[in-house]
Amino acid sequence: MQAVSKYNAWLANQDSPVADVYLADFLDECADAKCDDATAALSAAITGNSGLFGCDMMSILYSGDVSGGYFVGWRDNVTSKAAYLLSLVNLGVVV
């Protein structure tokens, strides 16, 4: 999770004069393939092949959570959360 925090800090400070420092912190966090296991586990969870949580994250997102105000198949919930998970996988692959 440290890498995600550093990535979010970089995003929040992209217009800052020290944005390069935030980017370097993020890249250092995942240097030397430190994020490979997390990337593989997250991608497996997204595709339904067990992974990090031993579940199919896309099915869980689609199923919703009525107590949290998310209903079955609610497009806005599914697409925004799935896109975030996929962006994390992309970052893990690229970095």
Image (tube, grey):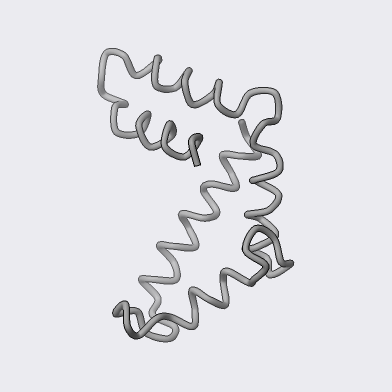
In the image, is 12 to the left or to the right of 54?
Answer: left
Residue 25's place in the image compared with 91, above or below, is above
Residue at the image position 26 percent from the left and 24 percent from the top: 15
Residue 92's place in the image compared with 83, above or below, is above
Residue 34's place in the image compared with 42, above or below, is above
Residue at the farthest right position: 49
In the image, is 81 to the left or to the right of 12?
Answer: right
Residue 69: give x, y in percent of width and height. 29, 80
Residue 72: give x, y in percent of width and height. 43, 86
Residue at the image position 65 percent from the left and 46 percent from the top: 39
Residue at the image position 69 percent from the left and 60 percent from the top: 51
Q: How many marks?
A: 0
Residue at the image position 74 percent from the left and 67 percent from the top: 49
Residue 94: give x, y in percent of width and height. 62, 34
> Camera-side residue: 47 or 69?
69
Quadrant containing the C terminus in the rendered view: top right
Residue at the farthest left position: 16
Quarter of the figure with residue 80: bottom left
